[in-house]
Amino acid sequence: MKIRAVDEALHEYLRARPLRTKSLVVTVFGDAIAPHGGTVWLGGLIRLLASFGVNERAVRTTVFRLAREHWLRGEQVGRRSHYTLTESGRRRFEAAFRKIYAASTGAWDGRWCLVIGSGDRLSPARRRALRDELAWMGFGRFAGGVMAHPAIDEDAVAAILQEHEAEQHLLVMNATADASFPDTALGDAVQHAWDFARLERDYRAFLDRFRPVLQLFQRHPEGKLDPEQCFMVRTLLIHEYRRVMLRDPLLPEQLLPQHWPGSAARLLCRNLYRLTQRLTEQHLMATLQTPEGPLPQAAPYFFARFGGLAQADAGGAAPTAAAALAPVSG
């Protein structure tokens, strides 16, 4: 059963915020297709995205461009075209979506990772590309040639430097602030290194947009919800959350402004994702196919998202509204 008010909210969302097809396809591949093996028949993907008003030509053009950019690899099986995540595409998806679905961060030990430029040994173009990549990881600019992040994944930093062939030209250090000095300078550096004002506006807009949808779903038994509507809600939820969250450096709580809305946004996203999970998966299994036939079941890592999802097909119960409202832990 479709919830009329949710349908109206979805139509208003799509009217007010027209979707870029490429960005939507990236969201669907990362959220829905990658956990099911990463391969999909193009015709099924076209049917899936028709729910959002995306036409066949736009989908075909988009997957062709993603293949040209080495995100996807096309394969013809009989008269059907299938698209599969490439290895580099899978790594890029995993890096981005791991951040989205991760459990809450642990305590911070006060360490900072510093990446320091050494002269002009990199071309301007390579410096810009590397700076953009580090900023995407959450690094902020503390000074000319110095980027920093607290407790970043050092293996990920090393992989980026290696990919840009910059490991011989940049200095990577771990550092802590000197406790004998007041932390005023550090606070000022943090405030200037990241755009908290924009992030806060976007998180509050996300909460305003999806909090009413969560409340509507809570009023209806999960078994009476509509699978296609659940798929649309889950997809737009992650699509919107991804746009904000991937710009969030995910700093420790003690470095954030007071009353930071990022935590509330994450809790809402987790709760609504859990409520729509089972029926969204049902819709995917009914709509998508691979060269071998039906879409395979989701990989085990899928059920670790947001600290744990129900595995109804493995004997677990589907999440209830009460369970979806449980506090975040782990």
Image (tube, rainbow, N blue to C red):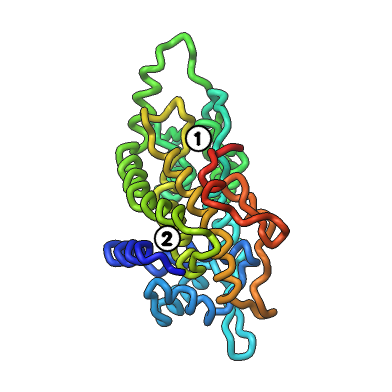
Name the residue rendered at 37%, 47% in the picture: 207
Question: Is residue 51 shown above or below 43?
Answer: above
Q: Residue 255: x percent and y percent?
A: 43, 27
Q: Nearer the viewer, residue 290 or 126?
A: 290
Question: Closest to the observer: 147 or 138?
Answer: 138
Image quarter for residue 62?
Answer: bottom left
Residue placed farthest to the top in the image? Answer: 180
Horizontally, is 283 left or right of 21 in the view?
A: right
Q: Residue at x 48, y 79 (%)?
A: 47
Front residue of 165/279: it is 279
User: Which circle's residue, 2 or 1, is located before the other in the chain?
Assistant: 1
Pointer 2 residue: 236
> Which residue is disc 1 drawn over?
115
Query: Are there few (<14), some (14-19), or many (20+) residues within 10 Å of tag 2?
Result: many
Amino acid under label 1? Val
| Mark 2 element type | helix
Answer whether residue 165 is visible to the viewer in this image: no
In the rendered view of the protein, which quadrant contains the C terminus?
A: top right
Q: Are marks 2 and 1 in contact (CB under 8 Å)?
A: no
